[in-house]
Amino acid sequence: MQIDVSDLNDLEVLRILLCDLENLNDLDVLRFQEVGGVVKLEGGYSEKILYRVVSGDNSWIVMLLGSERHEVVCSKMSTSELDDFLSIGMFLRDVGIRVPEILGCSSNFSALLMEDIGDETLSDLVPKLNCLKRQHFYTESLKVVLKMLVASKEFMERGFPASQRMMNSEVLAKEMNSFKEYVPRVLASTFTNHEANRFQDLFRSLANKTCSDDFYFVHRDFHSKNLHIFNDSICVIDFQDACLGGVYYDAASLIYDVFVELDEEFREHCISFFIAQLRASGLFNESASSMRRTFKLQALQRLFKAAGAHARLALDAKTQHEHAFQVRCTCAAVRSIGSISNEFNELVWVRDLALRVLRSNPKLSECP
């Protein structure tokens, strides 16, 4: 499909794409030709654009796979990438995990029509929830993680493309490297050469300690903004980067999520619940104390990655509002890094450094 879209508005572009969708009957196409409203949605930080398309009392989500409208209409997503995305979604549905239903795909593989699951995410809900309701949604979210872990063998046996992606120690160490590069620049701090070398050694150590010989299904971005609350149940999105990795990765991502403020007592409750369920599943026979230690190390690894990623996004932010948001997320990650490090005698230096960075930071007022 080669179309000059420079003079078309979003609604006109979407009508072209919607009428090109495959796997739809004539009634569906007619309904989409009568689209009356389009709302552009926040698409996160991946290379995709999301629109809510409204027709009468009905609404759908159109996901455009490209960074610009002209790329979406004129270029083509590789069939292997699309197959990968669809196969992960199919697997999650098959094991009883709620994900948005895919209703159609454009003939050039650049647009997907999806079920509209609303805008309410777990991160939106947390500040409004009482203790019991918050506990309910986090328990249900951790049960989703457990379902994915238990189904890991099936995922590998079915030979999905994502099952060939492995989060080994090299990948885990690489995830943390951006912490040294971007966090000092954003939080107006500096690391000495000695501290930088200690971080490099720490990253290698954390990667080795959290990389298991056994691999499990990992969503890889399992946090409160990727968990929608739809009809009072958890609906998982943004699973396109799924791979095989460590057993604690997704649960640590959720419990030490930088988008929400959770008190340490609640986090400890969630960790205890997850470990108890993991042991009951038969996947692990280690002692609870050993599992808790490894869980905390995995959380530390994930937080180093998060701090670096959000610091980079702060530097790339196009608005002051976006910059301030990313600085807050960076600060939240650094604060949790300090808190977890305080539990390990050998990591007291990390705790002290985290406190130094936060206390000396002139942007501290932007931090939560």
Image (cartoon, rainbow, N blue to C red):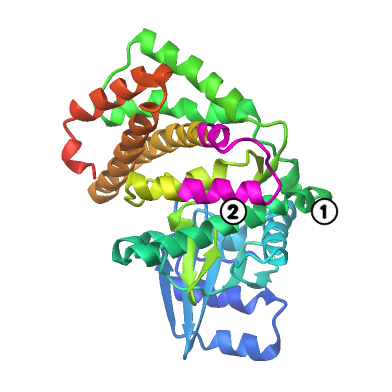
241 sits left or right of 51 in the view: right
From which residue to which does the magenta span run?
Answer: 270-294
Identify whether 356 is placed above or below 106. above
Q: Which mark is residue 145?
A: 2
* Residue 128 on image: x %, y %: 30, 66
- Looking at the image, which residue is at 62% across and 53% down? 146
Q: Which mark is residue 158?
A: 1
198 sits left or right of 31 in the view: left
- Give the residue type at disc 1: Arg
Mark 1 secondary-structure assignment: loop
Mark 2 nearby-residue class (10 Å; few <14, some 14–19, many ≥20): many
Q: CA distance from mark 2 to mark 1?
A: 19 Å
- Give the residue type at disc 2: Val
* Residue 202 on image: x %, y %: 48, 19
* Residue 263 on image: x %, y %: 32, 48
Identify whether 159 is placed above or below 356. below
Mark 2 secondary-structure assignment: helix
- Looking at the image, which residue is at 52% across and 62% down? 140
Task: Identify the image quadrant of the N terminus.
Answer: bottom right
- Looking at the image, which residue is at 39% across and 27% down? 341
